Image (cartoon, coloured by chain):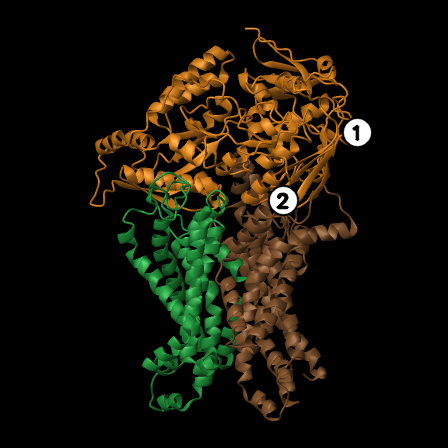
Amino acid sequence: MTEFWIRFARNRGAVVGLVILVLVAAMAVLAPVLFPRSPWDMAGAPFMPPGEMGMLLGSDSLGRDVAAGIAHGARISLMVGAVSTVASLGIGVSLGAIAGYAGGWVDDALMRFTEFFQTIPSFILAVLLVAIFSPSITSIVGAIAIVSWPPVARVVRAEFLSLRGREFVQAAECLGKSRLAIIIGDILPNALSPIVVLASLMVASAILLESALSFLGLGDPNLMTWGFLIGSGRSVIRLAWWMSVFPGVAIFLTVLALNLVGEGLSDALNPRLARGRA
Amino acid sequence: MGVSRRGFTAASAAGGVLAASGLMRVSDAIAQGITPRRGGTLTTMLTPEPPILQIGVNNQGPTLIAASKIFQGLVKFSPTLEPLPELAQSWTISPDGKVYTFKLQPNVKFHDGTPMTADDVVFSVTKFHFELAPRARAIFSMIESAAAPDPHTVVFTLKQAFEPFLLMFDVTACAIVSKAAFDGRDYRQAPSVQHPIGTGPFRFAEWQRGNFIRLERFADYWKPNQPYLDAIIFRIVPDSQSRRLAMETGQTVLAHSNDIEPFDVPTLQAIPNLAVETKGWEYFSPLAWMEINHRAAPLNDVRVRRAISQAIDRSFITQRLWFGINKPATSPVASTTRFHDPAVKLPPYDPRAAMQLLDAAGLRPNAQGVRASIKHLVLPYGEVWARLGEYLRQSMRAVGIDLVLEATDAGSWARRIGAWEYETSINFVYQFGDPTLGVERTYVSSNIQKVTFTNTGGYANPKVDELFATARTSAAPAARAAAFSEVQKLLVDDVAQVWLMEMSFPTIYDRKLHNVITGGTGVNASFDDMFLAS
Amino acid sequence: MDPSRLPAFLLRRGIKAAIVILAIIVSNFFLIHAAPGDPASVMAGQSGAADERYLAQLRTQFGLDKPLLEQLWIYVRGMLALDLGYSHRQQMGVAALIWQRLPPTLLLTGVAFALAISGGVTLGALAARRVGTWADSVITVIALTFYATPIFWVGLMLVLLFSVVLGWLPSFGMNSVGADLHGIAAVLDVGRHLILPALTLGLFYVAVYARLTRATMLEVADQDFVKTARAKGVPEGRILRRHVLRNALLPVITLAGIQAGQLIGGSILVETVFAWPGIGRLAFEALLARDYPVLLGVFFCTSAMVVIFNLFTDLLYAMVDPRVEVQG
């Protein structure tokens, strides 16, 4: 474990990313303490520039505090990112594991299925799914999960294909362990590192995807998210640049941090690739 | 009583004098030393892109705005909704209010060169629009007979008196089409649907879908020397910020309807060469309200509806969200419409009174301070309406009602309102200049239908039904006014809907453009008198 | 690859592509029909007034009164005859509608793609070659920045800078209407309008391809055949070009094929921001209006484009097959 951290810490970008991520998470956790009022409450006059009327990042078109929106939005944006990633990992890992472990026609069929999902333009699919099931947190998370799982399935399948023939798997088979036990207990732990790296990147792209959906007006109207803030600020961007700039920066920093951490994880879990960095 | 009105004659029009309000405009221009100048292209916008430009086959806002340059009605309307001559140079109404006789302008040609005659008018009214447009069908089914005694005279005999009949002859309600182009064909599939042929000052020239529509000057237009402009280009610009930029940079010189978001209006207003007007919507007078489904508890309790109404600060909505473009509603009949009663008032904004009403209705706050949870279907017509939903949610929260917002698209919204599958929503409905045409449909129990823009809320009051019926069948304006005053009081007492605001839309134009808004239908005018000063 | 095996390879891929397209037709059809909202009530709603007769009339027109399976059969049969149906809302054949909107999208995505792949591979190769230096860091940071920024946000910022502040480039549309330009002037006019949207769409993928090229080049550089080449004394520049870059390009090509669809998806956002009259925007407008025939047509068309693009990359893949090179 310490060796892992040493390798991780050798990537300075990753450390910076981790620090940003911890700060964002802290902001999300502390939001109700920092801004006890609802982020939807009109806290002052509309279109106040940053610093006026005690609002650090200005107010929006209804006089709502942008800073409160960003802090409360961090909770939802991170949650959307995390939950949809978990959901798509669920789909991707199961399908990838089955395909890779079973091989043969099952593998073939599942891979055709995966390919099919990769062929349909994923953003258009996400837009369509959210529109069909009408915009809500569930439909947004579901749509993101449905368009994000194919890469997971491919990576997991590749790992399983290569691990399938190893001695420890054969040994487990000889011991009469059930297939499920072998998949979950023996192979999966060994395939974990690329999944972990992929997951950090998926959280990032889920946050981006959510903001794009909100931009097109497909956000959940009851939830404060960064995507919502940009969506509501973009049309007044020249009247109140702060409304879309700050949430945009929040997304940028978080996505950047997740990417940096992903790289650090990749370095730490896969030392061969980290060679050039030191 | 012997109502008999004569419009302006063709002679006066031919003499270079424009009708009523246009006359004022031109004299204004002349007073400033500007005479109408021939030439120039008007570059404006159209949002969203219309599917086709044939009025009747499609009657959506963008279609009407572009096609009202190609087509014309028998009459047009002044800002106070007085009828003015257009294709009809004059008309008379029989004393019993049943017989309408129109004298048509001579020398009117369609864009294909054929003359327009009384036959075309009869066909347009009794066949074309009757077949295609539900609104026209409802009114024109009252026509007992239509006759064309000579090529320039049309006589409509009604089954019973119908005082607002003339309001149906604006271009937006009943554009005159060529009988030869449609008769005997499927109107929707006729070739001229793709290439509209009208009598208007501009003819259809080119349409690059997703990009622009171009109309060009019709040389054989019946008003001599008009139109002044050589061409009109409608650019399709789907993004509101791009539209605002186009106005700022002068890429377009006229923005109208929903082109410019309310919050952008003050910025554009500050630009010296741009003028902003909110007039020109009197004929339509859209009235917006919080749509209440009377079938859903606790909304069936009048105290709860009144509490909701009193919890809303309408001036916040009109000032903060619509930047003063809209006005707070005071009655179910908009103040720009005939028969609006200024004595009728909505109960004032008073959250404390609202909470007392909710207490009285037995809705007590629970531990979280919530008295009731009500769903709200957000009107999916863009940004400002989304903000309105958020504002209503916070206002309701302040009196203990938890308003849960539901997002939707335009299609699902229309379907759910039509199927009564909602608790509250926002709706806005055109008033069409007369309560019988635009208000009655929302409140009478005979119009409780599973169709949008009927009485979808399910409000029913026999007294209201009776008053609307009286007003509909009465030929005397005074009797109608009395019935409408009574009905406005009753509807306000019952809080039949939670009226929010009288809507208008900003028309923004370059000051070198003259005669932009001249009548009660604003940019739906033919633009035959519009000109670009050099 | 052995040239004699190419026809069989192409045939196999062609059959696969056909099956994928058929599956897309069928699933798109059911997907859209699962959508709430009935096109008749949408149209009635937007025209401001409606009665039952009008709604019934519209439903008959849309074929919505027929059983679902019959509608599907009509649809599949039509698609196979390349008849994409008729949009009653737009009063126009869907195929004609898409044909009109296709060239702008192909132009936009084509230019953006060329920009992304040339820029991305160049930057990625540069970073990999100078790994660990300041140049590598700068390129990595730039790539990460664009990778982490919402695409529409980049578009808005470019509009702010180049249209509003500097006034250099037009912010919307594809050409200046009314200017009546011909020949070179007209081409240049479209070019000026193209710069910002293509840049917006391209920059994100520059970042994607740069990161990927860098990563795969580093990975390939570590492999045995490179070490062998180095041991044989092959010059470093030649190793990089002949062995490393060529092999590293494969994953980039594969990804590019897969992402052709994402590029079109991204064009919904970009076309909306810049009012670009392409099919990305058509798709979104059709979705809002519940214009089923157009939606089905656009999905078919974009998916078919991706399948064709994938075929093309497969072919490219076969031509730069690493095994041929490694053995040689």
Q: Quadrant of residue B349?
A: top left
- Chain C pictured colour: brown
Label 2 secondary element: loop
Q: Up-down: is B390 above or below C162?
A: above
Residue at the top extreme, as displayed: B1
| Residue C90 marker | 2
Q: Position of residue A238 (x, y in %)?
A: 50, 44
Q: Amino acid at mark 2?
A: Gln
**Which residue occupies 34% across, 62% down?**
A23
| Residue B74 marker | none
Chain displayed in green: A
Q: Nearer the viewer, residue A136 or A65?
A: A65
Q: Up-down: is B20 above or below B422?
A: above
Q: Nearer the viewer, residue B30 or B381?
A: B30
- Chain letter for mark 2: C
Residue at the bottom extreme, as displayed: C232
Label 1 secondary element: loop
Q: Which residue is mark 1?
A: B113
Q: Quadrant of residue B202?
A: top right
Chain displayed in orange: B
